[in-house]
Image (spheres, rainbow, N blue to C red):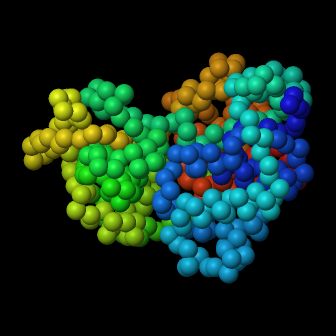
Amino acid sequence: MNATTDLLIIGAGPFGLSMAARARHLGIDHIIVGEPMSFWRTHMPSGMYLRSACDWHLDAQNEDTIEAFLRTQDLTPADVEPLSLDRYLEYVQWFQARREIDPWRVTVERLDTTGNGHARFHASLTNGDVIAARSVVLAVGFAPFKHVPEDLTRVLPLSCVHHTCDLVDFDAVRHQRCLIVGGRQSAFEWAALMSEAGAAAVHVSHRHDSPAFAESDWSWVNPLVERFATDPGWYRRLTQSAKDELGRRLWTEGRLKLEPWLASRVRAPHIHLWPNTQVSGFRDLSGGGFAITLAGRDGAGEVDVDRIVLATGYKADVNRVPLVARGNILPQLQTDNAAPVLDDYLQTSIAGLFMTSMLATPCFGPFFAFTVSVRASAKLIAQALGPARA
């Protein structure tokens, strides 16, 4: 499988697939590697719904959209929203077929830069083969970036906890007492799914008031993200206070609201909410399970549980990407607070190496943690690879 290409795309999630479609459209020689939508298929639960609507599609040409896919089934967005994970995956599979994207289902063990013309990068595969590439797009998504807050690691043994992305088979919680630490959409949706799967009790602890069940307004996000294609540096030119304000606005829509369709499911009798609390103690129970102390402004209480789940999100850290950590990239890579420093076209300090998705959020804003940005990402990188064609 040794091969040489102009562009190697590592990662076959939404950002990688959108990039591959753009490269194919522009006639850029490329290879995309990875199991298609692997994180979505193995680390998200069946029965989950997306917060995004049908306008967050993958096609930078705006042809093979989610709405176009729905038309093949005589459906409209109104028929399918909220959009289920299963239907979104069906769309992605259709998009791949339409754009003739067939990723190499291989794993890159390490990435090295050679500084040598067309073979500027060597991607070593786990089977011993090597792909040589002039340019590389790293689109690894969320998998390496599970976030466990330090205050929790001081209280809870890591061997006793699961991150939400590692607990997606809810048959495992049937008849169990569970604690979810976190207070955003994933915490509440996991609580509903676990309760519906037969959990004996689900406790949800978070440090703030419980978010409101209210429809989020994402209409203002699309124009900002689309602006990157014609004005790549607009976000970087903002003052820090303006960036903070955008972050707060996105936080308000994405974190301080819960989808209305979830409300009745969370009001199940076996779900218990503990707002304005935090985990302050842990001990093993003699009969099995754990006693967890939850401390809050009204004092402290204890809950007995069999399973602890952290809905604590993700945090970008390029050092935690195994294929980067094993190669010679890191010593040459300019970073800021563990994130790559990127130019206006998502290119790192190493010429020809691009990083997108969550690793781009410090330089390009929180939008790049959402699939709304896949098309802008593909357009920016394509402009850097071949400005005359992009």
Q: Residue at x 45, y 52 (%)?
A: 247
383 or 134, which lies in front?
A: 134
Taking 102 as reference, is 273 left or right? left
Vertical position of residue 239 compared to residue 115: above or below: below
Answer whether residue 113 is visible to the viewer in this image: no
Give the farthest residue toward the left.
Answer: 299
Image coords of residue 324 (percent x, y): 65, 26
Residue 321 falls in which quadrant of the image? top right
How many numbered marks, from 0 up? Answer: 0
Is 322 left, or right, of 51 in this rendering? right
Residue at 31 percent of width and 39 percent of height: 308
Q: Is residue 67 visible?
A: yes
Q: Residue 287: image x %, image y %? A: 18, 33
Quarter of the figure with residue 193: bottom left
Percent coordinates x, y for residue 220 in the rendering: 53, 66
The picture places residue 390, in percent across and down from the top left corner, at 83, 54
Q: On screen, 213 above or below 141? A: below
Residue 115 position (above or below residue 173): above
Name the foreground residue: 268 vs 19.
Answer: 268
Question: Which residue is drawn at the image coordinates 89% and 32% (left, top)?
Answer: 4
Quadrant into which the N terminus falls: top right
Residue at image position (51%, 61%) is 50
In the displayed structure image, the side of residue 258 where residue 246 appears, left or right? right
Q: Quadrant of residue 227?
A: bottom right
- Is 282 positioned to the left or the right of 5 in the image? left
